[in-house]
Image (tube, rainbow, N blue to C red):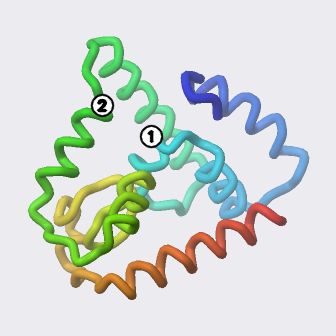
Amino acid sequence: MKKKEAFDEFYARFSATITPLGYSESHKIAALRRLITLKLRSRIAGISSSSFRSVVEHLRKTDQDLRQLEAMHVDVEEIDEQEFKSSPQRSPYSEQLKDQLKKEGRCFKCLSYGHRPNQTEACMASKALSSEEAKAIVAKEQAVEKAVEKQ
């Protein structure tokens, strides 16, 4: 997805490319998540991936919301940066790992995308991860992502 491209424009190209391939719902969702912008990816992390159509609809709405904020000259990334800095969670992670999690739009507590510590019920219920656990999870997810890209 191109940086300033609207989701609807991207989705038209995406669906034209992926339809003939006969992918399953889960493969379509994985491909879609991999190809959208980081800004969108970080905001759909908490949604259920049970239906490709529901993921597409959520992305469409999220993209429209972000574009409305940008039209009002609200700096979404500045808001995210302030939330990141004011997060009450004290992290035992290295600066490198913190930077990576921040860049990927992940929560420092549960490593999910799209929220900050204790902003979702699932996150509040989870225990904080050690630095080693977080590194292992991130490395495993990167390996899976690379394997999916090769397919």
Q: Secondary structure at mark 1?
A: helix
In x, y percent, where is residue 63? 45, 30
> 10 Å neighbourhood of mark 2: few (<14), some, or many (≥20)?
few
Depth order, front residue of 122/115? 115
User: Of the numbered discs in the image, which one, if any, rests on residue 39?
Assistant: 1
Assign the C terminus to one quadrant of the image: bottom right
Q: Can residue 63 be seen in this snapshot?
A: yes
Q: Is residue 99 left or right of residue 73?
A: right
The residue at 18%/47% (across/down) is 83
The mark that comes first in sequence, 2 or 1, is 1
The residue at 88%/52% (across/down) is 21
In x, y percent, where is residue 32? 64, 48
Q: Quadrant of residue 48?
A: bottom left
Query: Please, is residue 65 above or below residue 37 in the view?
Result: above
In x, y percent, where is residue 16? 82, 35
Q: Amino acid at mark 1?
A: Lys
> 10 Å neighbourhood of mark 1: few (<14), some, or many (≥20)?
some
- Tell me the distance, in whole angstroms, between the alpha carbons under discs 2 and 1: 9 Å
Identify the residue position indicated by label 2 in the image: 76
* Residue ranking furthest to the right: 20
Q: Secondary structure at mark 2?
A: helix
Q: Quadrant of residue 134?
A: bottom left
Whether residues under marks 2 and 1 lie with C-beta atoms below 8 angstroms apart, the answer is yes
Query: Please, is residue 38 above or below residue 110 in the view?
Result: above
Depth order, front residue of 64/71? 71
Assign the N terminus to one quadrant of the image: top right
Q: Amino acid at mark 2?
A: Val
Q: How many marks?
A: 2
